[in-house]
Image (spheres, rainbow, N blue to C red):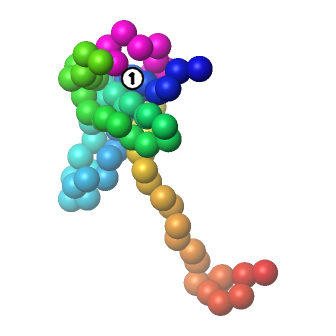
Amino acid sequence: MSPHTVIRHATLAPMTDLADWALIPDGALVVEQGRIAWMGPNAELPALWQDSPCLDAQGQVLTPALVEAHTHLVHAGERS
């Protein structure tokens, strides 16, 4: 088992600049031990991971570290 996961050719939505969504087309993401180690344009993937086996996202959108924790007013209070 590899100690890291490399995902390439993704459209990354890192949510760093909410004004324009700051999408990174043809992006790459590296996960090591369950944490994001690096993300950015695929062309700038550091040499350390260039030859690693990777998952090809085929342009799919990834939202690294997004936690979607919203609720609806109808559920305010007791939800059981």
Q: Is residue 14 magenta?
A: no
The residue at 43%/34% (across/down) is 31
Q: Please, is residue 49 above or below residue 61 in the view? A: above
The residue at 21%/59% (across/down) is 19
In the rendered structure, which segment of residues is drawn in magenta? Answer: 49-58
Q: Position of residue 10 (x, y in %)?
A: 39, 29
Regarding residue 55, the answer to whether it shows in the image is yes
Quadrant of the image for the N terminus?
top right
Outermost residue, top side: 51
| Tally of numbered discs | 1
Residue flagged by tag 1: what amino acid is it?
Arg
The residue at 37%/23% (across/down) is 9
Q: Position of residue 72 (x, y in %)?
A: 58, 77
Q: Please, is residue 77 above or below residue 12 in the view? A: below
Q: Which residue is mark 1?
A: 8
Outermost residue, bottom side: 77
Regarding residue 59, the answer to whether it shows in the image is no
Q: Position of residue 18 (x, y in %)?
A: 25, 58
Q: Position of residue 25 (x, y in %)?
A: 29, 31
Q: Please, is residue 35 above or below residue 46 in the view? A: below
The residue at 65%/90% (across/down) is 77
Quadrant of the image for the C terminus?
bottom right
Q: Is residue 29 left or right of residue 53?
A: left
Callout 1: SS: strand
Dot 1 crowding, Cα within 10 Å, few <14, some 14–19, many 20+: many
Q: Quadrant of residue 39?
A: top left
Along the line of sight, the residue nearer the viewer: 48 or 80: 48
Q: Is residue 15 left or right of residue 66?
A: left
